[in-house]
Amino acid sequence: MATLRHSCHVLTAHRALSTQTCSRNSPLRLTNDGKYCSPRIATHGQDGMTTITPANNTPAPLAALPTGVLLRSLFINAISSRPHLLRPAITFMSYLCQPNRSFVFDTNRNKLLAGIMRRAVFRHFCAGESASEVKQTLERFKSMGFRGTIVAYAKETVFDYNRNVVQDAGIETFPRDPADSCPNIERWRDGVMETIDMLGEGDQLAVKITGAGPMVTDALAARGPLPKQMCDAMTTVCEQCKQRHIRLLIDAESQRYQDGIADAGLDLMTRYNRDGHALVYTTYQAYLKSTASVIESHLMAALEGRFTLGLKLVRGAYLSTEKRCLIHDTRNDTDNAYNAIAHGVLRKRLGSLGADGGRPFPSVNLMLCGHNKESVFSSYALHQQRLLQSLPTVPVGFAQLQGMSDEVSFGLLQLGQVQQGSGPEVYKCSTWGTLVECLGYLTRRALENRDAAGRTMSEYKALKREAKRRLRSFIRL
């Protein structure tokens, strides 16, 4: 009976998350191969399949969104869902990231422009510019039901392959003397340690290694050893995270630096990811053609090194600045790659690892960061199905960026309400720093919305439905 009660709540029932490809009233199925259509409510049948059927009494996911945030989301999505409005917005924000701007377009000097950007964009996507602002944001997310927030200090370096330029807003250039400590590395360490101090229970830390400046990025690009000062800084950060029971998620960055970042992540995981628990995670970008083979090689390293691989999976956010030949040809190819990796890890069978007659699958902790509804909910359904059937799987958490895919985030949170607290582990991802430091991050969010026009329009329609629902409720009062 307990098993039956659990199976009846494997997935939530909410009408807003149905997709265009499936009828609202027809039952949907998740097969043992992980083929999935749309999230509703699931029951476990005698044929070994999880049947997804609609429910009628669950509130819309966006009902939990504060009215002020809802209205700002409507404004942002009204622009991002319309290409003729989004294109000039991206051009404008990209220009703000360039050096040597005139007074009118310099957010450091033009206080009016800075104020407009803060109110219109920054507060929607970023946690804040100070410790007090960030802490308020993190508490607000917890009050909405999230397990916590994954927070990153915004300072970073981006290499634009198409223009052959390095973008490093907020990072100064200093004389390079190996005998002296590097001010950029010191500032990076101080910024990350300040971030740790902001975190509360359930919050996690993300880091952008390229924010430590040219000495570090040159070493990453050459795939050579990091400066000793940087290694010491990373050790200090890891020890503090270990003491505070905070997970450290190393962000993926420009491909010019990514191999070096992955090497640094593997070294830290070898040292800190023991006893079946991942303190350190490395981020893998599914839009890169090489990602599946990279993950398989890292899984092999985890197996041979007897450590737990912390695997954070994203689609990728540097499409406009990378070599196009490195990236999957179509969005559908990227979706398929993401789903194949996520479902393979959840089944503990990827490539030659976990296969019949092959080598065993290593210990893995998985964090799925994504905005695609079908990818997110199919992965959750698969994980629940395997738990229900006592099949091998791995611990998994879910996360979406602040200001994006709130319908997905709150849909996941509803699972915990339906299942009386046994739902998925859901986080929001956010960034903090000065407006100038966050401009590159904000521009990538605009580009991400451009590259996911269908999802953005779906979000906009969901926001409009929620706004109309609230207006009708107010009028009836």
Image: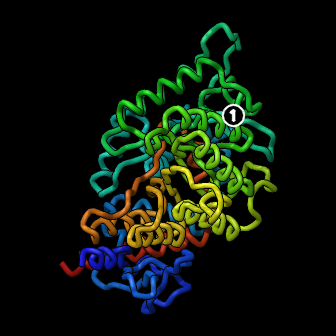
- Residue at screen point 74% across, 62% down: 328
Residue 19 versus residue 402 in the image, above or below: below
Callout 1 amino acid: Pro
Image label count: 1
Mark 1 — residue? 99
Q: The N terminus appears in which quarter of the rendering?
A: bottom left
* Residue 42 image point, x, y percent: 38, 80
Query: Relative to residue 97, is residue 163 drawn left or right?
Result: right
* Residue 244 image point, x, y percent: 35, 33
- Residue at screen point 54% across, 67% down: 372
Residue 71 visible at all: yes
- Residue at screen point 65% across, 20% down: 227
- Nearer to us in this view, 14 or 345: 345
Residue 359 versus residue 475 in the image, above or below: above
Q: Quadrant of residue 339?
A: bottom right
Q: The C terminus appears in which quarter of the rendering?
A: bottom left
Direction front: furthest residue: 357
Query: Relative to residue 98, is residue 344 drawn left or right?
Result: left
Q: Residues within 10 Å of mark 1 (few under 14, many from 20)?
A: few
| SS at badge 1 | loop
